[in-house]
Amino acid sequence: MIKVNIKRNNKKVYELVIKGHANYDSIGKDIVCAAVSTMAITTINNIMALDGSIDYEDNSGFIKIRVLKDTTVNEKILNNLVMMLEELQKQYPKNIEIRNEV
């Protein structure tokens, strides 16, 4: 199962950690893993291209995004990532779990 841990301060995401594997299908054929990876990497690339206000780590089965500077850009793009992950969780509740921390 992919576990997503979202940390917020004043309702704004300041850290997001994605770890694990969905186990929906075999490696290379797992559509849930592919979707999560695509969403996360696209989010990272967008923020880095627009204002570079995050730090990130990307290892096999682990992605960590940490906000360095609170900007409108990263707030909107990270909220979009969270909404997409929540929609994916609705469709694949056995493969992705999202936890919110305050």
Image: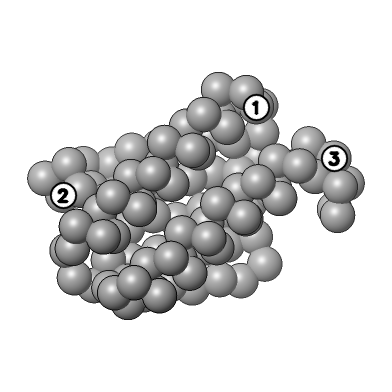
Circles 3 and 1 in contact, beta carbons < 8 Å = no
Q: Secondary structure at mark 2?
A: strand
- Towards the viewer: 59 or 72: 72
Q: Label 1: which residue?
A: 92
- Kindly identify the residue that appears in the image at 85 percent across and 53 percent down: 27
Q: Amino acid at mark 2?
A: Asn
Q: Quadrant of residue 99?
A: top left
* Above or below, comparing residue 90 to residue 4 in the picture: above
* Label 1 SS: loop
At which x and y percent is residue 40? Answer: 52, 56
Residue bearing mark 3:
25
Q: Position of residue 16 (x, y in %)?
A: 39, 54
Q: Is residue 79 above or below residue 56?
A: above
Q: Specify whether residue 87 is in view.
A: yes
- As measured in the structure, the alpha-carbon distance from the residue carrying label 2 to the one carrying label 1 is 28 Å
**Considering depth in this image, is 68 or 100 the residue closer to the camera?**
68
Image coordinates of residue 11 in percent, x first then y, are: 17, 42
Q: Which three-letter amino acid code belongs to the residue tagged 3? A: Asp
Can you say whether 61 is above or below 89 in the image?
below
Cα distance between the residues tagged 3 and 1:
12 Å
